[in-house]
Image (tube, grey):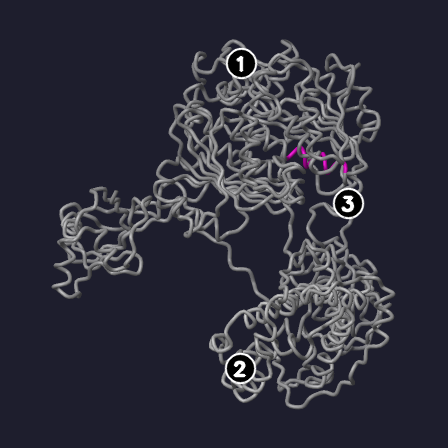
Amino acid sequence: MGHEAQRRMMASRALLVGLSGLGAEVAKNCILAGLSSLTLCDPSPVTSFDLGGNFYLSESQIGQPNRAALVKDQLAQLNPYVHVDVASGIQKLDAASILPLLDGMTCVVITVPLPKPLLIEINNKCRSLNCSFIYTLTTGVFASVFCDFGENFVVADKDGNPPATSQIESILLENPAVVKVLEDQGRHGLETGDHVTFARLKGVEGIEDKKNYEVKVTGPYTFELVGIDLSSLPPSGLQQGYITQVKQPVNLTFDTYETALGKTPEMLSDFAKFDRPGVLHVAYKALAEYFEENGDYPSPGDEAATQAVYEKAKAMDSEISERIVKHLASGSKAILSPMCAAIGGIVGQEVLKACSGKFTPIPGFFYLDADETLPDGLLPADEISPTNTSRYDSQIACFGKTMQQKLLDQNYFIVGAGAIGCEMLKNWSLMGLGCGEKGHVYVTDMDRIEKSNLSRQFLFRNTDINKFKSSTAAAAAKFMNPNLNITAYQEKVAPDTEHLFGDDFYDKLTGVCTALDNVEARLYVDQRCLFYRLPMLESGTLGTKGNTQVVVPHLTENYGATRDPPEKSIPVCTLKNFPNQIQHTLQWARDYFEGEFKQAADEVNAYLGSERDAYLSTLQPNTKLDTLKIIRKALVDERPVSFEDCVVWARLKFENLFNNQIRQLLHNFPPDQVTSSGAKFWSGSKRCPKALSFDLDAACEDAEMRNHLDFVVAAANLRAMMFGIKGRTDEEYFRESLKNVIVPDFSPAEGVKIAANDAEEEKNNSNESMDTGDSEAEDLWNSLPKQSELAGYQLNPIDFDKDIDDHMLFVTACSNLRAMNYSIPTEDTHRSRAIAGRIIPAIATTTALVTGLICLELYKVIGTPRKELTLEAYKNGFLNLAIPFMTLSEPTPPAKTKAMLKGKEWNWTAWDSLDINLGDITLGEFMEHFEKEYNLEISMLSHGVSILYSFFANKKKVEERKVMKMTEVITSITKKDFPPNQLFLTLEIIANDKDTDEEVELPYVKFRFR
């Protein structure tokens, strides 16, 4: 959210009217985000429908009054810094009760149906109080959201993206002035009307640093400075500098609820349903009329009431979809956990926008639906009639009792119990997934709970810190629904845990859900799902951005079928000598931390913990000399015995890194150096550096940090920690100690090679690898203290952790000093932490939304009642709550490979295999089976890297193997027995059609031997 937005939010108060399923979700998300105060208002008694979405209500509370009071204490536990209270003395939701509560509120959210006149009255009073108004409903698999933030709502940051930054290549001295940015660093990302500031500008008069300039975009790498005439200036030489976008406030005007009702909403959630917002707008108005006349929504199975709603909608629009209106009316009382989660995420973010002024709000009405989960016609009344006592009444009202039983009998495996995993388990417990006699849920996560998890992983509390995520989340989900059958593991899902998650494990599953934070693990799970032909539910978040992907066997492509391009790496020579962005200096600082405080200690410990000769034999010729120098420095030349020694070391490191090395670089490449083509060497992305003179009081102009002092303090303390010496941080001590440090004078060395580009760097490295420096290495080796002289002595390697302030102080100071060398704008510790750790925090709102959307897909995977779904019915989601934007689109079908098998064309996909389930037959029987079944002659058969048969193999060996069982053939080659839980073998085959003798391209063979 940013510091300013968070401060505004922590001073905001919100009123939440309605604590059924949607209200609970909105409350949870707002409390986790850190509002100052949230007042709950809902005197209504608990119904069985509420249990479909409210995770803090139970069946034993059905009929008890005041839903708000019943859930208040558990909601308050989510964040002790948020004041949660219940509006007192409220007997019914009418004007007399609600209107007095609006005073002093920043935002009012209504999540239960109220009469139109009352909503208009509340909305109008909100306007008079400059208070944002949100009205939102979930009715089965349909939902609506309305936002009115007033006539003049100021958005401080419309999209939440970091300000665009670029490095300047040149500025054309024209009227208006034209700026061109370096193309190799990407597009400038600006829009006409944006404002920019300049920093570290060289070679151009008439443009001031830190002054705002309006731009007019003329191309992806160029823009004009509006109103700036530089045509009268004389031609300049080298031009360099940086531009940074200045986020401008945006003023937005909203319609009132009454006005917006008369307009057709424009915001789409699914581009395949262009007319759906208009249809639902009319349908919801008809439903609202019915509610005002009858005081309640239609009951499931009440055909007369459903028809009455349709007649009202038809009177407004004669061509309206009968199916949509009737399904909306029939399921209008249903509170479904997935839809509550999805809309709760959206509305929760709208509340945060109202309170913080950050991100663009929804402009009026927004509708979402998942009608693909519903049958074509209404189900019979006896199939959907409520019991009024079951927590599953809401789902039964939409999908029927048969579908609910299917949900209960599912066996699902969820990999990960972090933010997404917690939300998913909550949804599943409310849906009843795995809660039947035949059903089960398995969850695994090897991580333990940290304090930072509590703001987005809502199943955890302060008392759970350091416990395993999986077992804690499983216990919390089971508390919500005691019938949930769940088993928790603390293992990763990878090849080395296939003894646990093997054939027998996947054989009993009906689906898999990933809640992972890395692509590698997702790809592994994806391969497992492909092999076992299991559906996979995939989702991910990146701040306010999120995505969902449903993978259905044979119908959609698998997760790994399309991948993002690999992340662009920073060239080595750029990091070492020619940085031009703060990302470069931060990466350099992180690498330096790793080498100085981790790798050096590891190397010393490896030496001390080994026999001398054995250790020497492990050293690679091209790195032996450098490694021995590291050990010699740590154990002899620079080994500290006191903290003062660490301070001296840190001061000398400053001099070497930020003064001497820069002076050596300028000795090799002077500021006026030209290339062989006559161009200036220090131009374009190469910034001419300057050496820094040590000054304890110096502060950088951008981040305003005392980087000189910070570097020495952080470096000395990390050095002390590595050598087991007690550190200290008081400034006066450092001032006194540094007065006594003697810094040797520097003289540039001759013959030092510095690569001007990556090609030269590679050449230098190859030359160095040829020169092993054996004589110098031998002298160093003989000068090292014997291990016996240092028995029991060990260094403490320090692993970089972005969440440890001492680590980040060093990295930030080191990066900023490097940036100051090269006139790169510096960053403070908070921003450096985000860049160095590549942090885009998970937030509760986006997490809730993506899990809600993927659980709506889960309904489809399990099976829409009385309907066979095609590819178009499934939806992948892409969203950004900041803009706001959402699009649901059909998945991509799997790619097909054409093969001729037994004279017929077979178009197979990655989901297909040749399945053989004949037991552990012999190799000869296996080959005969292929001839009879597929008319194929095998020319080569392999298992992994082992060739079991080939046409060119030794005939005698082939005949011996043909009478052996398949497993015996493989174990005779691999010398490994099969695990007891393994059921299948994966075999690769090359075969020719016996009639045409042409090779046939085939999928793998899935051979079940047990």
Q: Tell us which disc is closer to us: 3 or 1.
A: 1
Q: x and y percent of residue 622 in the render?
A: 51, 80
Earlier in the chain: of badge 3 and badge 1, it is 3
**Residue 763, labelled with which disc?**
2
Q: Distance between the Cα atoms at labels 2 and 1?
A: 77 Å
Can residue 699 be seen here? The reply is yes
From the image, tell me which residue sits under label 3: 156
What's the amino acid at mark 3? Ala
In the picture, measured across the screen, residue 943 lies left or right of residue 888, that is left
Instruction: Name the dominant secondary structure of the magenta segment.
Output: helix
Q: x and y percent of residue 933 in the render?
A: 16, 45
Mark 1 secondary-structure assignment? loop
Q: Quadrant of residue 468?
A: top right
From the image, tell me which residue sits under label 1: 389
- Answer above or below: position of 591 versus 849: below
Image quarter (top left, top right, bottom left or bottom right) of the N terminus: top right
Label 3: few (<14), some (14–19) or many (≥20) C-alpha neighbours in 10 Å: many
Label 2: few (<14), some (14–19) or many (≥20) C-alpha neighbours in 10 Å: few
What's the amino acid at mark 1? Thr
